[in-house]
Amino acid sequence: MAKQIRNAIIRGELRDGDTLPAEAHLIAEFSVSRPTIREAVRILESEGLVEVARGARGGARISSPNYEMIQRAAGITLQAQQVTIGDLYEMRTLIEPPAARLVAERNSEAAVPILRKLIDEEMRHMRDQIAVTMLISEFHRLLMELSGNKTLNVFSQALRALVDAHLELSVRGRPALDPELSDREMRYGLKSHSRLVDLIEARDGDGAEAHWKNHMIVAGKAWLARIGQESLVDLLD
């Protein structure tokens, strides 16, 4: 029964916020016992597909699949495996440059205005370290999304919350820099973003992949130096 309800959620026949029918109706529809119904709901609740409110006015509501599910699962699994920040960043360095190639070769026309608009936002918030760091993270996220490969995007989203949390931690723990030096460093990074978009606009897949690989390596050295390459991935609580 859990499988049937799960499939109905995935197909969109049951939508986010919909209430599951009463137990009596489900028993009649599926020809199963009350304990079977309750076990199915328990399974779906554990999967994050159903939210159950207890009490006289309670009930089971559909919670459509979302990226928070895989982010939480990824965080727990990576921490259990004692994965390091260096390991996490290495994986990103492996998958983002090919994604940049896909954007250039498949989705240049749609991607360029979206990415340029975000770069403008980055420039406007350049002196707000927390804000610009989150905008930079958004640039990376959009790059994966605009690649057009849904599986690649799901893997990226699974790690996004972890990456964002550790990026913010690296900024908060960073010693105060000379403003001129900080501006120069940030402008260099954002200029690299602009160069990538130029390559995407030119539909230069080879150039986009090579440039972004170099960018990830250089940026990674700075980021990992602040937080520690051997630091363990931590949960987002």
Image: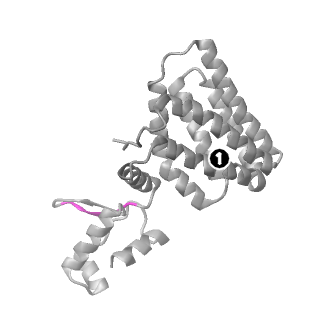
The magenta stretch is 57-63
The quarter of the rendered structure image containing the N terminus is bottom left
Question: Which residue is at 47% across, 41% downward?
Answer: 85
Question: In the rendered image, is residue 142 in sight?
Answer: yes
* Rendered position, 72 above or below 118: below
* Rendered position, 41 above or below 163: below
**Colouring:** one colour
The one nearer the camera, 88 or 55, is 88
Give the side of residue 20 with respect to residue 106, left or right: left
Residue 101 place in picture, x, y as percent: 73, 51
Residue 26 place in picture, x, y as percent: 28, 79
Give the side of residue 200 with respect to residue 152, left or right: right
Give the side of residue 19 with respect to residue 177, left or right: left
Residue to which mark 1 is pinned: 143
Question: Which residue is at 77% across, 54% downward?
Answer: 105
The one nearer the camera, 63 or 154, is 154
The quarter of the rendered structure image containing the C terminus is top left
Q: Quadrant of residue 133?
A: top right
Give neighbour class at mark 1: few <14, some 14-19, many 20+ (Cα, 10 Å): many
Q: Secondary structure at mark 1?
A: helix
Identify the residue at the far left of this view.
56
